[in-house]
Amino acid sequence: QQQVKQSPQSLIVQKGGISIINCAYENTAFDYFPWYQQFPGKGPALLIAIRPDVSEKKEGRFTISFNKSAKQFSLHIMDSQPGDSATYFCAASNGGSQGNLIFGKGTKLSVKP
Amino acid sequence: DAGVTQSPTHLIKTRGQHVTLRCSPISGHKSVSWYQQVLGQGPQFIFQYYEKEERGRGNFPDRFSARQFPNYSSELNVNALLLGDSALYLCASSLSQGPGSGNTIYFGEGSWLTVV
């Protein structure tokens, strides 16, 4: 049973546009929601993370929006650049337990110049 | 500063063989986790070790085992390899056990295992 569902599977955006990736979770015990960026041949790198006590967190061009009642969260990339082309993974965790991350299946983002 | 280092980076094994993958966490980090990433999928949790004790185990068969050494480095062992074990094996380290603010989980670049 997949506990974190991510969409879309792939996304093509023009340079300067907004990229939006969505995730939904099932386990209400999750209390930590990070986004990871992965380039080909590299390990995932933490981009931004949020806890459910806030509805939005912004770091530079990256924003997480969080809707606790709907059990959904999303990543917005403003002014998307070709260098943002990568695979993005949302994840969730119950920090009070063993602390492992449960990942979505990933979104491959291509930003066209 | 050295990040999470893993070895080997690539390896090819035959079905039925055994493999050992190694990981050195970031200096000062006491928690090491292992994840399996099949092509086109997100990483899946295998094990977490903290202070040399197993603190979590994912839904993987007993062919998978791991351990953490006194210097906090770790090994992942897989016995009786199957074709389906072909994947990128990621090691992650963090200061303490649970993820959350102030305890970022850092991933290495992984070990690519191909089983033929």
Image: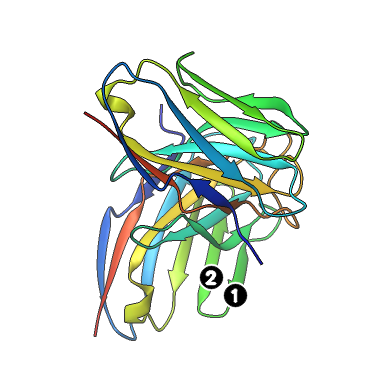
Q: Amino acid at mark 1?
A: Glu
Which chain letter goes with mark 1? A
- Identify which residue is drawn at 25% across, 58% down: A10
Q: Quadrant of residue A48?
A: bottom right
Mark 1 lies on a secondary structure that is strand
Q: Are marks 2 and 1 in contact (CB under 8 Å)?
A: yes
Q: Which residue is mark 2?
A: A63
Q: Is residue B115 above or below residue A33?
A: above
Q: Quadrant of the N terminus of chain A?
A: top left
**Disc 2 with disc 1 on a shared chain:** yes
Q: Foreground residue, B16 or A31?
A: B16
Q: Is residue A49 left or right of residue A26?
A: right
Q: Is residue A100 left or right of residue B72?
A: left
So how many labels did they put on this image?
2
Q: Quadrant of the C terminus of chain A?
A: bottom left
Q: Foreground residue, A16 or B23?
A: B23
Horizontal and vertical percent position of residue A24: 45, 45
Q: Quadrant of residue A41?
A: bottom left
Q: Is residue A64 left or right of residue B15?
A: right
Tell me the CA gap for discs 2 and 1: 6 Å
- Identify which residue is drawn at 31% across, 80% down: A82
Give me the disc on residue A59.
1
Q: Is residue B17 above or below residue B3?
A: above
Which chain letter goes with mark 2? A
